[in-house]
Image: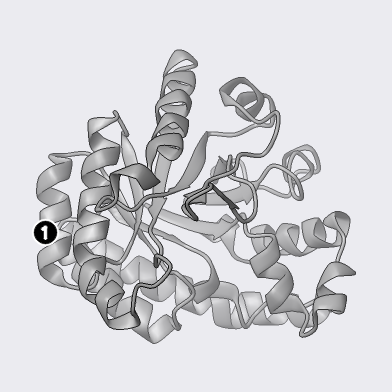
């Protein structure tokens, strides 16, 4: 899997503008133009692009921006999260985007992101229900669904405690998703090779891809290499590829995506190809 992730909205605005006022001034249409540029100058060189359902689609399909041999994943999750009465994160979905609508938008499949804290049972009920419902919906349409799991730091939890818990949180999040019927997983790099091997063992043939979480390219390449050596099936990467290559200026955006981001994409693809050859 070599998927370019560009479904970010708030996060992409923060990359494009320094101040909150400037970020709010970037409307959906403008963000869609930036995302179309990512498709044209970067993602069409990959096997797939992940886009949200509010900015870039169906325009990239209708306008012929998306290459015919590049797959399209539609992001189901909305920006941000809500909190329940105990302060646990509640994942949000973009209204009106289900399996049928994904197909209508030209999607090859979709991606669902939810938050889990596997060590805290009461934190997960609503989000687990979202996973169940979406898996059932996409199965009914015979359409691919990638399940992405993120975890988060609890109120009062120290940085040190969270860092220590993180590898097991990702491994157990993978376990929960697989038990719910997930067929493809998108996961943060779990911190070390041992955790990657545990995920692969749990997956028992179910593909899993590592996400970049906004780390720099050099760090991500190392993570990808370790994950692939330990059984991962590829990457679904966004900011590590393009965070310093997008701009509201079309010429600057085109140049940096073609020269810098595309070079990074080739380096990642070389790691994936080497892993495929070795296996």
The x, y position of residue 169, in whole percent, is 25, 58
> Which SS class for mark 1?
helix
The residue that appears at 44% across and 79% down in the rendered structure is 215
**Residue 274 at least partly seen:** no
| Residue lying furthest top | 140
**Residue 185 location, quadrant:** top left
The x, y position of residue 96, in whole percent, is 70, 28
Q: Left or right: where does residue 265 sit relative to residue 233?
A: right
Applied colour scheme = one colour
Q: Nearer the viewer, residue 267 or 93?
A: 93
The x, y position of residue 247, in whole percent, is 76, 78
The residue that appears at 38% across and 47% down in the rendered structure is 123
Mark 1, Cα crowd under 10 Å, few <14 / some 14-19 / many 20+, is some
Q: Left or right: where does residue 110 sit relative to residue 254?
A: left
Relative to 228, say whether 173 is above or below: above
Q: Tag count in the figure?
A: 1
The residue that appears at 74% across and 70% down in the rendered structure is 13
**Residue 180 location, quadrant:** top left
Label 1, on which residue? 197
Q: Quadrant of the C terminus?
A: bottom left
């Amino acid at each position: 899997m070599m998927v370019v992730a560009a479904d970010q909205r708030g996060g992409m605005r923060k990359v494009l503008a320094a101040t909150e006022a400037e970020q709010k001034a970037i409307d959906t249409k403008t963000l869609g133009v930036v995302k179309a540029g990512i498709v044209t100058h970067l993602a069409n060189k990959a096997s797939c692009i992940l886009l949200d359902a509010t900015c870039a689609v169906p325009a990239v399909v209708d306008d012929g921006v998306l290459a015919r041999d590049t797959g399209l994943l539609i992001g189901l999750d909305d920006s941000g999260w809500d909190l329940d009465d105990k302060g646990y994160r509640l994942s949000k979905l973009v209204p009106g985007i289900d399996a049928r609508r994904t197909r209508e938008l030209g999607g090859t499949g979709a991606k669902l992101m939810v938050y889990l804290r596997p060590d805290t049972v009461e934190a997960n009920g609503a989000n687990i229900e979202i996973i169940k419902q979406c898996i059932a919906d996409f199965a009914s349409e015979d359409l691919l669904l990638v399940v992405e799991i993120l975890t988060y730091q609890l109120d009062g939890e120290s940085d040190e405690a969270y860092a220590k818990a993180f590898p097991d949180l990702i491994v157990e999040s993978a376990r929960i998703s697989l038990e719910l019927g997930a067929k493809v997983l998108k996961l943060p790099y779990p911190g070390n090779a041992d955790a990657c091997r545990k995920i692969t063992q749990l997956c028992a043939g179910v593909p899993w891809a590592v996400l970049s979480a906004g780390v720099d390219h050099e760090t991500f390449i190392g993570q990808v290499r370790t994950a692939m050596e330990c059984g991962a099936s590829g990457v679904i990467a966004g900011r590590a590829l393009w965070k310093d290559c997008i701009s509201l200026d079309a010429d600057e955006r085109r140049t940096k995506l073609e020269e810098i981001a595309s070079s990074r994409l080739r380096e990642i693809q070389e790691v994936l190809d080497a892993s495929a050859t070795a296996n």
